[in-house]
Image: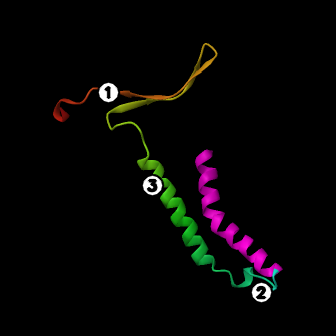
Amino acid sequence: MRMFIEMTLLLFSPFIAYGVWGWFAVSRGRRKTIWDRAPFKLLSGIGLAMVIGLVGWQASYRKGSAYSKWHPSEVIDGKLVPGYFEELPLPENKK
C-alpha cells in the first residue's frame, strides 16, 4: 500500500504543482484559466519519470547482499522484533 501511495503521489505531483502555480497566476490576473492550455504530455512525462526513478532507487537501495535471506518483522511474546537480513554461506563457486 505504501508503494502505491508513493507512486500515485509522484505521478500526480507535477499536476498538483502546476495547479498551485496556476492558482497563483490566476489570482494575479495573468490568465482566467490554466487547464485549457495545460501541457498534459509534459506533466505526465515528468510524473512517469519520477515514478521510474522511485522504483529504480528502491530496487537498488537494499541493505542485504545477494547471498542473504530477509526475515520480516514479527511479534514474539508481545514484543515487536524488527526484520533483519540473515547472511547465508557463499556457494562453493563464489569463495
- Is residue 5 depicted above or below 87 in this figure? below
Outermost residue, top side: 77
Of 63 and 66, nearer the camera is: 63
Crowding at dot 2, Cα within 10 Å, few <14 / some 14-19 / many 20+, comes out as: few
Q: What SS does tag 3 mark? A: helix
Crowding at dot 1, Cα within 10 Å, few <14 / some 14-19 / many 20+, comes out as: few
**Camera-side mark, 1 or 2:** 2
Is the Cβ of the residue at disc 3 closer than 8 Å to that at disc 2?
no
- Is residue 84 depicted above or below 35 in this figure? above
Magenta residue span: 1-27
- Is residue 67 depicted above or below 2 in this figure? above
The amino acid on which the numbered mark 2 sits, given as a three-letter code, is Arg
In x, y percent, where is residue 24? 77, 76
The quadrant in which residue 92 appears is top left
- Relative placement, left or right, of 63 versus 45 is left
- Relative placement, left or right, of 47 versus 18 is left
Q: CA distance from mark 3 to mark 1?
A: 25 Å
Q: CA distance from mark 3 to mark 2?
A: 39 Å
Quadrant containing the C terminus is top left
Identify the residue position indicated by label 3 in the image: 56
Q: Main secondary structure of the magenta part?
A: helix
Query: Is residue 11 within the magenta segment?
Result: yes
Identify the residue position indicated by label 1 in the image: 88
Q: Which mark is residue 30?
A: 2
Q: What SS does tag 1 mark? A: loop
- Residue at the image point whose x is 54% and y is 65% from the top: 48
- Residue at the image point whose x is 64% and y is 16% from the top: 78
The amino acid on which the numbered mark 3 sits, given as a three-letter code, is Gly
In x, y percent, where is residue 4? 61, 51
